[in-house]
Amino acid sequence: MSTVPEEAERLLESEPVMAHLGTCVEERPHVAPVWYRYVPEMEIVEIVTTGRKLANIRENPRVSLSIQKDEAGQTHWMVSLLGTATVVDDCAETAAARHRINEKYDAEPAAYAENTLVRIEVGSARYRTY
């Protein structure tokens, strides 16, 4: 049985909207926007990040992602994911993931060149359409 419902997968892949990554270290939550790419056949989310988000993930790999599509102040859909993050300290894999994510967001290839790949294995998913 799939962890991520088919409709939630469709929403996650539908367009380049921003996700908000939630991490927590020393009982202090930290939420920050990230670009992402959902990989349905593996039920993982790829992000490339640096700084506090990356440091928090290294210390506590339990994370959450909230993705929502809004237009003119009206919510169309939302997907919330809980998962376990793995930092991938491999330059070639990071470069390939960066390319895939930048392609989704129609960004320049050099955008975010200093970031590190993080793969989030989805443990649970909720979604809602409006």
Image (cartoon, rainbow, N blue to C red):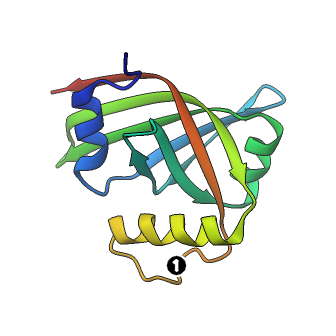
Label 1 Cα neighbours within 10 Å, binned few <14 / some 14-19 / many ≥20: few
- The amino acid marked with disc number 1 is Ala
Quadrant showing the N terminus: top left
Name the residue carrying label 1. Answer: 111
**Quadrant of the rendered structure where residue 95 is?**
bottom right
Residue 81 horizontal side relative to residue 130, left or right: right
Q: Position of residue 93 (x, y in %)?
A: 61, 65
What residue do we see at 67% from left, 37% from top? Answer: 23
What residue do we see at 23% from left, 34% from top? Answer: 77
| 25 over 52 or under it: above or below | above
Looking at the rendered structure, the secondary structure element under dot 1 is loop
Q: Position of residue 54 (x, y in %)?
A: 73, 52
What residue do we see at 70% from left, 61% from top? Answer: 50
Q: Position of residue 73 (x, y in %)?
A: 21, 43
Q: How many dots with numbers?
A: 1
Who is closer to the viewer here, 46 or 22? 46
| 81 over 54 or under it: above or below | above
Who is closer to the viewer here, 21 or 125? 125
Who is closer to the viewer here, 1 or 98? 1
| 129 over 95 or under it: above or below | above
**Quadrant of the rendered structure where residue 70 is?**
top left
